[in-house]
Image: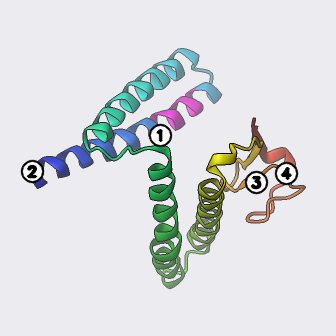
């Protein structure tokens, strides 16, 4: 059973990566003036999402909302506290300032994600309504307030997308 679980996890991971990669390819094709190819990339990306979703459901990694919040919170804390610190050190040792900045900003954003998940777990029953603002540059998420500048990367408020 462990080999089957590993295979399902590999399928989920591969499909999730493909879906994201194809979305970026679609954006590039659109910018280069190839709308039909962009559409093809988006269609196949959606198909890959279906494959990844099926594999994830077969792994039984989707719980009730409270369980999903808890798992997401724990994952964000682990990534922010362990993985990115290693990545930052690796980039610094290699003298790659751009990678070091990327990893540092990503770690900071992951910590914000964990905080948002924790708040959602604490207030799940309240079902409060809010608007989230996501920085298109680094991924920082602001809860209910559009910042003038991103506290992680310094991007201006025009770089934020709102999610109502």
Report helix, strand or loop for mark 4. loop
Q: What element carries label 2?
A: loop
Compared with residue 150, is residue 57 higher up or lower down, i.e. above or below? above
In this view, 128 is above or below 102: above
Query: Which marked residue is nearer to the observer: mark 1 or mark 3?
Result: 3
Mark nearer the N terminus (4 vs 1): 1
Q: Nearer the viewer, residue 144 or 40?
A: 144
- How far apart, in angstroms, are the residues tagged by discs 3 and 4? 6 Å
* Residue placed under numbered mark 1 in the picture: 20
Q: In the drawing, does residue 59 fall left or right of residue 3?
A: right
The residue lying toward the viewer, choosing from 62 and 150, is: 62
Q: Whole-Å distance between the Cαs marked 2 and 4?
A: 47 Å
Reading the chain from its start, which is encountered first: label 1 or label 3?
A: 1
> Quarter holding the C terminus?
top right
Q: Residue 142 carries which label?
A: 3
11 or 29: nearer the viewer = 11
Count neighbours of disc 2 (C-alpha within 10 A) and say few if under 14, some if 14 to 19, many if 20 or more: few
Query: Which circle marks residue 48 in the picture?
Result: none
Which is nearer the N-term, disc 2 or disc 1?
A: 2
Which of 38 and 81 lies nearest the eye of the viewer?
Answer: 81
Which residue is denoted by mark 2 in the rendering? Answer: 1
Provide residue 148's location: percent of width, then percent of height: 90, 55
Report the magenta residues as a range: 20-29
Mark sitting on residue 145: 4
């Amino acid at each position: 059973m462990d080999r089957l679980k590993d295979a399902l996890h590999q399928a989920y991971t591969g499909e999730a990566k493909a879906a994201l990669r194809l979305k970026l390819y679609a954006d590039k094709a659109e910018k280069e003036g190839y709308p039909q190819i962009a559409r093809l990339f988006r269609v196949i990306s959606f198909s890959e999402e279906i494959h990844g979703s099926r594999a994830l459901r077969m792994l039984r990694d989707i719980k009730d909302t409270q369980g999903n919040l808890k798992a997401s919170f724990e994952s964000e804390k682990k990534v922010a506290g362990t993985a990115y610190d290693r990545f930052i050190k690796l980039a610094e040792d290699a003298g790659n300032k751009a990678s070091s900045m990327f990893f540092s900003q990503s770690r900071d954003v992951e910590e914000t994600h964990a905080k948002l998940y924790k708040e959602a777990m604490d207030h799940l029953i309240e079902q409060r309504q809010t608007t989230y603002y996501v920085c298109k540059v680094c991924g920082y998420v602001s809860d209910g307030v559009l910042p003038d500048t991103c506290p992680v990367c310094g991007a201006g408020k025009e770089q934020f997308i709102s999610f109502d």
